[in-house]
Image: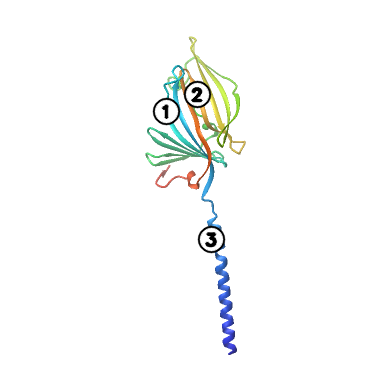
């Protein structure tokens, strides 16, 4: 009888221990469930147009798109053009850029220096021959004028205006006025991200303007190369 009681007590203790183990197992599963599945970004939509300074009514849409701006220096731009979608995923802190071609399904990975975030100056169209300036041309750049800050939805942008003058022998002078509005990331050592701009060169005006900017939750995969892409 004593042996039977002892055996029952041992089995009960084993059962209690097993129950206790099962009770603690969900803790590990809870930690896995708390792994981040999304990231908070500022989602900003834009439209880019080209028009004539002498005939403002002749406006054509060049592209439209969406920025996804994360607080840690990562951002994504989805550009929608007539020839198809093109996406750039950039980490400005780590100097890494991925360009996604949705036609060829190719992802090109490389580095991106901070100065390359600046769009090309329209005045470059004046270059001739192999890309050099006309013989005897002079190139003057004004000191950028600070335009202060402006708020568009959840996004704060800081603006500058710079004037470029190119003079060639014979008296011809072409003036370009560039107005740029950029977003400053958390790291002060990193060049800001250009969001809006207006380039005036001769009669041509190219302009990119935001239409909305709001906080949103997006999947962490937003900043990853999608499945089905060949990485180069």
Residue 36 tag number: none
Residue receiving disc 3: 29
Q: Evaluate if marks 3 and 2 touch, with contact meaning CB atoms under 8 Å apart.
A: no
What is the quadrant of residue 22 in the picture?
Answer: bottom right
Residue 137: x and y in percent read 50, 15
Residue 85: x and y in percent read 41, 37
Residue 185: x and y in percent read 58, 37
Q: Evaluate if marks 1 and 2 touch, with contact meaning CB atoms under 8 Å apart.
A: no
Compared with 79, 174 (above or below) is above
In the foreground, 131 or 221 = 221
Q: Earlier in the sequence, mark 3 or mark 2?
A: 3
What is the quadrant of residue 151 in the picture?
Answer: top right
Front: mark 3 or 1: 1
Residue at position x 52%, y 36% in the image: 213
Residue 98: x and y in percent read 47, 40
Residue receiving disc 1: 61
In the foreground, 103 or 29 = 29
């Amino acid at each position: 009888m004593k042996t039977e009681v002892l055996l029952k007590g041992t089995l009960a203790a084993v059962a209690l221990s097993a129950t206790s183990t099962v009770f603690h197992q969900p803790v590990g599963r809870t930690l896995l469930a708390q792994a981040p599945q999304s990231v908070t970004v500022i989602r900003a939509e834009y439209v880019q147009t080209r028009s004539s300074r002498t005939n403002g009514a002749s406006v054509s849409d060049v592209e439209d798109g969406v920025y996804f701006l994360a607080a840690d220096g990562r951002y994504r731009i989805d550009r929608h053009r007539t020839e198809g979608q093109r996406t750039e995923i950039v980490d400005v802190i780590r100097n890494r850029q991925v360009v996604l071609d949705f036609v060829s399904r190719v992802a090109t990975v490389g580095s991106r220096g901070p100065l390359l975030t600046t769009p090309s100056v329209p005045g470059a169209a004046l270059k001739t021959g192999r890309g050099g300036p006309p013989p005897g041309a002079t190139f003057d750049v004004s000191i950028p004028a600070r335009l202060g800050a402006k708020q568009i939805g959840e996004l704060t942008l800081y603006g500058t205006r710079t004037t470029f003058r190119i003079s060639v022998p014979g008296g011809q002078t072409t003036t370009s006025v560039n107005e740029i509005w950029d977003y400053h990331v958390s790291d002060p050592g990193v060049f800001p991200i250009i969001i809006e701009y207006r380039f005036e060169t001769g009669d041509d005006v190219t302009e990119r303007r935001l239409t909305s900017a709001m906080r949103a939750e997006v999947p962490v995969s937003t900043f990853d190369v999608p499945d089905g892409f060949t990485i180069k």
